[in-house]
Image: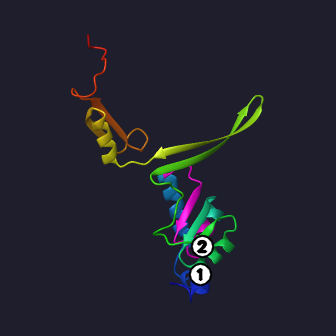
Amino acid sequence: MFSKSAALYDLIYGQFKDYADECRRIAELLKRIRPGAETVLDVACGTGEHARLLSRDHGLRVDGLDLEPEFVRLAQRKNPEGRFVAADMTDFDLGRHGRLSTLDFHYLIGREAGIEDATETHELGLFTREELEARFAAAGFAAVDYDPEGLIGRGLFTARVSDRGPARQRPDAG
C-alpha cells in the first residue's frame, strides 16, 4: 500500500499527526485498563514512530508488525530493541495452540540463602461463556449466573447443584 512512499511517510504524516500526544493517550489508556503493563504489540506499526515514543517516553517495550516490509525495516531501525516483522494482521500468529494460552513465567526468588531462578509454564484453556455454562449444566449444576466484572475484572460464575444433579452427600442430608 505504501510501497512507493514508505521513505516519505514520516515527513508527510509528521506534519499533522501529533505522535507524542497519541502516545501519551495510549500510555494513559494502558495504565487505566492494564496497570503494570510493560509490553505492547503494535499491529499495523507503520514506520515505528509510535513504538519509538512509547519506548522512549513511557518506558514500554514495543514489538510490531506491518504488511509493508519497508515500514518494518524503518521501524526496526528506529527501535532496535523491539522485534518487528512483516505480516498481515488478519492472519498473524500469537503463538497460541488452538484454544490454549501458554504463559511462561520466570521468577527470581530472594531467600536468605541466596537468589533462586525458577521458571514454570501455565497452560490455560480458552472457553466462551456459553461453553462454560454448558459444562456447568452437564455437571449437574443449575441456576448458573455470570457477573462480567467479578472480583477483579475477569468475570465470575456462580452456580448451585441441581436437585437432579449427581448424588452428593450434603451436610443436611441424613
31 sits left or right of 128 in the view: right
Structure colour scheme: rainbow
Give 69 or 164, whichever is nearer the viewer. 164
Give 130 or 56, whichever is nearer the viewer. 130
Near mark 1 (Cα within 10 A), the count class, few <14, some 14-19 or many ≥20, is some
123 sits left or right of 105 in the view: left
In percent of width and height, residue 30 lies at 51, 56
- SS state under label 1: helix
In percent of width and height, residue 20 lies at 57, 69
In percent of width and height, residue 114 lies at 77, 33
Q: Which residues are magenta?
A: 34-53
Residue 52 in magenta? yes
Instruction: Place residue 49 in its image quadrant.
Output: bottom right
For badge 1, the amino acid type reads: Asp
How far apart in space, not on screen, are marks 2 and 1 (Cα)? 8 Å
Disc 1 marks which residue? 10
Task: Give me the residue at 37% from left, 39% from top.
Answer: 156
- SS state under label 2: helix
In percent of width and height, residue 65 lies at 56, 70
Instruction: Place residue 14 in its image quadrant.
Output: bottom right
Q: Is residue 113 above or below residue 69?
A: above
For badge 2, the amino acid type reads: Glu
Task: Give me the residue at 60% from left, 47% from top.
Answer: 104
56 sits left or right of 43 in the view: right
Residue at the limit of the structure toward the left, as seen here: 164
Task: Give me the residue at 64% from left, 58% from top.
Answer: 59
Residue at the limit of the structure toward the bottom, as seen here: 4
Disc 2 marks which residue? 49
Q: Are marks 2 and 1 in contact (CB under 8 Å)?
A: yes
